[in-house]
Amino acid sequence: MIQNLILSLMIYASDITGLPMTKTPTIIQTTQQELQKMDNSYHKGYIYGAEKNGTIWLTKNFNPDNPRDQSILLHEIVHVLQDASHKKYSCTGKQEKEAYDVQQKWLIEHNLNLKKDMNIDPLWLIIITRCN
């Protein structure tokens, strides 16, 4: 079932961003403690990250049926597509902006949003998505 979700989120992200499809990422779920030892992002009980090799790390409490959790996976899938495309971005903030824009669109379509449902502060979002 998660493979179907991954494929549908990849198509969704590709359609919105224009980034080409690539092979489906490898998903690794492990404990929160193990992932905290790695250099990944942490947000509200989820640690997640996409590596350049197309691997996405998620905690074991990831729920593939939850639209909020799906949006986290979608965000990381955008990064996988970005890396595979070799598209040149002026800074990592532009990559984050693209990923958060896709995530926000998904959330809105599911009557959710980044601020209220993901607890993402708008000021923090401006900071992380800008170029220095």
Image (tube, rainbow, N blue to C red):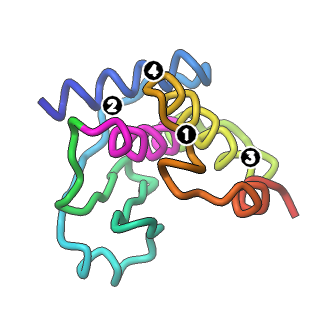
Q: Which residue is mark 2?
A: 23
Residue at screen point 25% across, 74% down: 32
Residue found at the very far right of the displayed protein:
132
Q: Which residue is mark 3?
A: 94
2 or 4: tag closer to the N-terminus: 4
Instruction: Name the amino acid type tagged 4.
Output: Tyr
Residue at screen point 75% across, 44% down: 89
Q: Which residues are magenta?
A: 66-81
Residue 101 lies, with reference to residue 127, above or below; the image says above
Q: Which mark is residue 12?
A: 4
Q: Secondary structure at mark 2?
A: loop
Q: Find the distance from the CA under tag 2 to the CA under tag 4.
A: 15 Å
Q: Which mark is residue 64?
A: none
Q: Quadrant of residue 98?
A: top right
Of badges 1 and 4, nearer the viewer stands 1
Instruction: Name the amino acid type tagged 3.
Output: Lys
